[in-house]
Amino acid sequence: MKKRIAVVASGRGSNFQAIIDAISRGFVPAECAALITDNPKAYAIERAQKAKIPCRIVDYSTFPSREVYEHALLASMQEADVDLFVLAGYMRILGSSIVRAFPGRMINIHPALLPAFTGLHAQRQAVQHGVKMAGCTVHFVDESLDGGPIILQKCVPVLDSDDEDDLAERILEHEHLCLPEAIRLFCEGRLVIEGRKVRIL
Ligand code: GRF
C-alpha cells in the first residue's frame, strides 16, 4: 500500500518538484495527494497543476488573526487525510495545535546543518558566521523551531568566495536529494523515533 503524502509550501516549490519527480520515477513509494499553501501566488501551485495534484490554498492574508488562519490550515490538513505532511519551504512557524495533531507525521527541510542556524536566512547566517561546512537537514517537526529529531543531513563546503546565494544554490541541490530520500524511508516504515534520535531500520 502506497502512503499518501501532502506537501506544504509557500513559494517557488523546487523541493516540491523534486518530490513529484522522485514519485514519478518510482523512487518514492507514495501518492502526493495535495499541495497545501498559504500563498495564492506561490509558483508551487503551477507545479501542482502540471502534475495534476489537488491544491488547497489557505490564504494567510484573508484571515483576521493568526489563530483563525491556523484553525483553517489545520482543517485543511485534516481533510487531506494523508499519512505524512512534508514542509518544503513553508515560511511560517506552525502553531502547536497543528504540530500536536500529527505527531511523528510531519517532516521539514531546513537549509542548514541543524542545530546550527535555525530560523530564517540560514544560508546567510552560515556565510556570516564563517563556517567551512554547511548543508541541509530533514527532521521531524516538534514544537521547537527547527529542533525536532533529525532524519538525514547532507554537507556541502562553504567557499571563501561564496555569498548567500551561491551557498543557497549549492545546498539546494542536496535538498532535492535529501528530502525525497527521507520521504522514501518514512514510506517504507524505516524511521523510528527514539527520544531525540531517529533510528533508520
Ligand atoms: C529551501 O531552501 C528550504 O530548505 C527552505 O526554503 C527553501 C524553499 O525552496 N525551508 P523551494 O520553495 O523548495 O524551492
Image: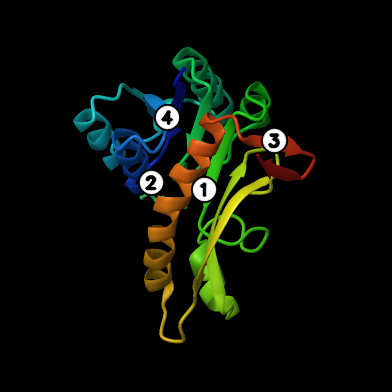
Horizontal and vertical percent position of residue 200: 65, 42
Give the spatial CA distance, label 1 vs label 3: 18 Å
Helix, strand or loop for disc 1: strand
Q: Are marks 2 and 4 in contact (CB under 8 Å)?
A: no
Residue closer to the observer: 169 or 188: 188
Disc number lying in front (4 or 1)? 4
Horizontal and vertical percent position of residue 22: 35, 40
Q: Amino acid at mark 2?
A: Asn
Q: Which residue is mark 2?
A: 15
Q: Which residue is mark 3?
A: 192
Q: Amino acid at mark 4?
A: Pro
Query: Which disc, if any, is residue 109?
Result: 1
Is residue 40 shown to the viewer in this render?
no
Category of crowding for the residue at label 2, using alpha-carbon neighbours closer than 10 angstroms: few (below 14), some (14–19), many (at least 20): many
Q: Horizontal placement of 130 versus 29: left or right? A: right
Q: Amino acid at mark 3?
A: Val
Horizontal and vertical percent position of residue 38: 41, 33
Give the residue drawn at x 44%, y 63%: 171
Q: Quadrant of residue 192?
A: top right
Q: Are marks 1 and 3 in contact (CB under 8 Å)?
A: no
Q: Which residue is mark 4?
A: 29
Q: How many marks?
A: 4
Query: Is 100 drawn above or below residue 130 in the view shown?
Result: above
Precedes in sequence: disc 4 or disc 1? 4
Horizontal and vertical percent position of residue 28: 41, 35
Q: Amino acid at mark 1?
A: Ile
